[in-house]
Image (tube, rainbow, N blue to C red):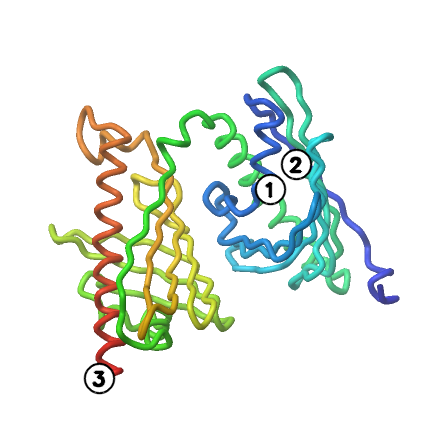
Amino acid sequence: MTVTEQRLTTHETTHAIDVAAPARVVYGIIADVETWPQHFKPNVHVERLEEEAGLERIRIWATANGEVKTWSSVRTLDPETLRVTFRQDVSTPPVAAMGGEWIVTATGEDTSRLQLKHDFQAIDDDPANVEWINKALDENSGKELSGIKEVAELADQLGELVFSFTDTVHVEGDGADVFDFLNRSDLWPERLPHVAKLDLTEDTPGLQVMRMDTSTKDGSVHTTESVRVCFAPGRIVYKQTTVPLLMTAHTGEWLITPSGTGVDVSSTHTVTLRTDTIERILGEGKTAADAREYVHKALSTNSGVTLQHSKAYAEGRRG
C-alpha cells in the first residue's frame, strides 16, 4: 500500500433487509455468484477467475449510476457463520479501494435478516468521488438486497419461472468472421430483417451498451436495452437492462467453438418470467407455462435468424 493510499479516508456503509426465507437459503444465493446477473438488476455478468476451498476470485461487470463498471474481488465464504467477505483487488475509478461483508442472521426457522456492509476509499479523497460511490452503493445495494429477498422468497417457484435454452448452427466458415458479424451489432439494421434500429455505444473496447428496436410479424416494434461484454475471438455475453413485459430478467451468450473444418455457433438464453403480466399480454387464463412457450418461441425465432445470417456471412467470405 502506498503512502497516498494510507492517507485516504475510509468510509463505511450498511444496508439491510428482512427476508421471509431460511437463513441458509439466503446464504446460498449470495454464495452462487454466477447466477447474480439473472437475479440482481445491477449485475451484467460475473465470472469465477480462481477457486479453492472457501476462497474465490471473481470478476464482475455491473451498472452503477448509469455507467457500466468492471472490477475483480477476492471472496471468503464461510457457510458455518453464514458470512461472505470480499475485497476488491482491482478497482475502477472513482473507487480507490473497496471491501465488505454479507452477513445472514436467522431470525426464525423460516425468516432471516441480511446485512451488506461496505468500506471504501475514493480516489484523491475527492468529495465528488465520495458522493458518486455513496450514491452507487445506496442504489445498487438496495437492488441487490431486494433481489435476494425476492429470489429467496420465491425459491419454490423458480423452477417454473427461470428457464434456459440453446440454439446452434454449424458454419463452414471462419470463427473470426462469425464473431465480426455478432460483434458489429451497429450494422444489424442493415444485416438483420427483424432489427429496425440499433444505437450502440462502445466507449471501452469490448464493452457495449445497445438500444435496439425489434420488429415483429404483426408490425409492432419492441425496444430493448442491453449491455454486452465481448470476449474475442469466440464469446459474447449480455444482459437486457430493459426487458419486455413478460420477463423480469433476460441474459444470454453467443458462443463460437471449432468444429471440423468450421465452427459451431450457439445462442443461449436464460429468462426469468414475470407472472403479473401474463394474462394482460397473452389473455385470460394463460399460465406461466404458456408464457414460457411464447417467450421461448419469440427469442428462438430472432436468435435463429441472427445465427443463419451470421452463417451466410461467414460462409460467403470463405467463398
Q: What residue lies at 82% left-to-right and 54% top-to-bottom?
A: 9
Tell whether 2 sits left or right of 262: right
Q: Identify the image quadrant of residue 266.
A: bottom left
Residue 153, given in percent of the width and then of the height, sits at 49, 25
Disc 1 crowd, CA 10 A, few/some/many (<14, 14-19, 20+): many
**Precedes in sequence: disc 3 or disc 1:** 1
Q: What residue lies at 39% left-to-right and 57% top-to-bottom?
A: 253
Q: Are marks 3 and 2 in contact (CB under 8 Å)?
A: no
The Cα atoms of the two marked residues, 1 and 2, are separated by 7 Å
Disc 2 crowd, CA 10 A, few/some/many (<14, 14-19, 20+): some
Tell whether 288 sits left or right of 61: left
Kind of residue at disc 2? His
Vertical arrangement, residue 261 with respect to residue 127, above or below: below
Label 3 residue SS: loop
Tell me, for residue 315, which label it has, or none: none
Residue wearing tag 3 = 319
Label 2 residue SS: strand
Residue wearing tag 2 = 15
Kind of residue at disc 1? Ser
Q: What residue lies at 64% left-to-right and 30% top-to-bottom?
A: 114
Quadrant (top left, top right, bottom left, bottom right) of the C terminus: bottom left
Q: Are marks 1 and 2 in contact (CB under 8 Å)?
A: yes
Residue 42, given in percent of the width and then of the height, sits at 51, 48
